[in-house]
Image (cartoon, rainbow, N blue to C red):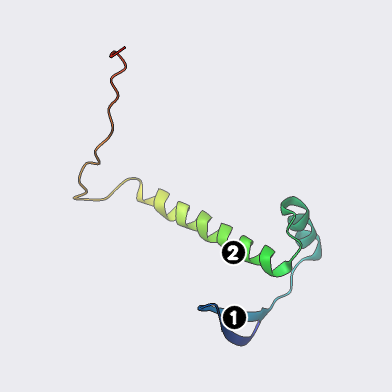
């Protein structure tokens, strides 16, 4: 991977990168997503990776947050017909 250029487009810092991708994997991803642009496809893949890893980290917490206040829940009265 070669990092070659940083640019700011619409207030977003973008980095141009040269990567080597498996052609079969790329074709499979394009077919499954109907995304033909390599840039868009790679961006979506990175978003999915970040979402998956965020979910994994959240799951590792196993609901453990000392001192967390109870979250109010809505209660429905189904007998009020």
In the rendered image, the residue lying farthest to the front is 81
Picture coordinates of residue 66 (x, y %)? 22, 50
Residue 81 shown left or right of residue 17 in the figure: left
The foreground one among 9 and 48 is 9
Picture coordinates of residue 5 (x, y %)? 62, 87
Secondary structure of residue under mark 1:
strand
Q: Earlier in the sequence, mark 2 or mark 1?
A: 1
Q: Which residue is mark 1?
A: 15
Picture coordinates of residue 41 (x, y %)? 68, 63
Pointer 1 local density, CA inside 10 Å: few below 14, some 14–19, many at least 20: few
Residue occupying the point 56% across, 61% down: 47
Residue 18 shown left or right of residue 66 in the figure: right
Residue occupying the point 75% across, 54% down: 34
Q: Which residue is mark 2?
A: 46
> Gap in Å between the C-alphas at discs 2 and 1?
14 Å
Residue occupying the point 74% across, 69% down: 21
Relative vertical location of residue 34 with respect to residue 70 in this rendering, above or below: below
């Amino acid at each position: 991977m070669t990092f070659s250029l940083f640019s700011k487009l619409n207030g977003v810092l973008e980095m141009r990168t040269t990567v080597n991708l498996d052609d079969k994997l790329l074709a499979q991803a394009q077919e499954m997503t109907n995304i033909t642009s390599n840039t868009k496809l790679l961006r979506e893949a990175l978003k999915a990776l970040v979402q998956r890893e965020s979910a994994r980290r959240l799951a590792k917490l196993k609901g453990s947050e000392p001192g967390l206040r109870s979250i109010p829940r809505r209660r429905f009265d189904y007998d009020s017909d």
